[in-house]
Image (cartoon, rainbow, N blue to C red):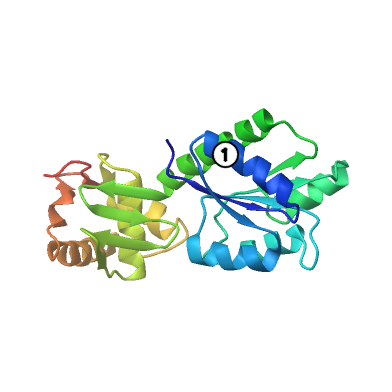
Amino acid sequence: MSDQTILIVDDEASIRDMIALTLELNGYNCLQAGDAMTAHTIIMDNRPDLILLDWMMPGISGIELSRRLRRENSTKQIPIIMITAKGEEANKVEGLETGADDYVTKPFSTKELMARIKALLRRTSEESDQQMINYDGLLLDQDAHRISANNQEVKLGPTEYKLLQFFMCHPDRAYSREQLLDLVWGGNVHIDDRTVDVHIRRLRKTLADFGYDKYIQTVRGTGYRFSSTRP
């Protein structure tokens, strides 16, 4: 059974009920809305894992709701499958350009719909995993631009954040100071390579408060590396 929740937004109750029955038989939790305003309230209160969104609805259309969701930071990452009777290529392009991740044209088979839902949720999960990196409780959330240690926020300066982000994305490999200057600061920045040492010390000092300073290791004769296992 899945613990994922899908919101069905369609002004036709019979279509909502048909889709909901199929989803529930496949182990998903379902929420329903008959218009865009109700849907937006449900989304803000419940944050579903995926939205099935009808194009044509009275009042605010599905296209307009999709645009609004993509503008808001709290909802822009929620995957959307647009469901509509409009099958022309131009309509499909418009739907995708407003932020929809996929497109199903009425009438559709429930098998096709389920296949698209599963594929999109799987892809979204894989992308989310890439944005969240965790080493023994030291968590990098690249979407939120945040570091936490055992659920406590780690406050870093912008350079220390970029340095730790680079290390956590490239663990267990030694980098020279020159390489770090090039890869973290940028190749066009002209500063002394000992600047790296200063920021490493600052980073270690902050991480020491949480017991993670030893993850940043000095490699004699080379530079530094981040260990993916507890030292």
Q: How many marks do you count on the picture? A: 1
- Per the image, the residue denoted by label 1 is 23
User: Relative to 104, is 9 above or below?
Assistant: below
**Residue placed most toward the observer, 57 or 155:** 57
Image location of residue 108, percent across then percent down: 75, 34
The residue depicted at 53 percent of the width and 39 percent of the height is 24
* Residue 3 shown left or right of residue 68 in the figure: left
* Residue 59 shown left or right of residue 46 in the figure: right
Q: Residue furthest top?
A: 111
The residue depicted at 16 percent of the width and 56 percent of the height is 212
Image location of residue 62, percent across then percent down: 74, 58
User: Relative to 169, is 65 above or below?
Assistant: below
**Label 1: element kind:** helix
Q: Quadrant of the N terminus?
A: top left
User: Relative to 106, is 44 above or below?
Assistant: below
Q: Amino acid at mark 1?
A: Leu
The residue depicted at 15 percent of the width and 62 percent of the height is 210
User: Relative to 107, is 85 above or below?
Assistant: below
Q: Quadrant of the C terminus?
A: top left
Image location of residue 101, percent across then percent down: 65, 46
**Residue placed most toward the observer, 144 or 32:** 32
Image location of residue 19, percent across then percent down: 65, 41
Q: Is residue 183 visible?
A: yes
Assess disc 1: are there few (<14), some (14-19) or many (≥20) residues with their C-alpha within 10 Å of its C-alpha: some
Q: Is residue 192 visible?
A: no
The residue depicted at 23 percent of the width and 42 percent of the height is 228
* Residue 32 shown left or right of residue 156 in the figure: right
* Residue 139 shown left or right of residue 105 in the figure: left
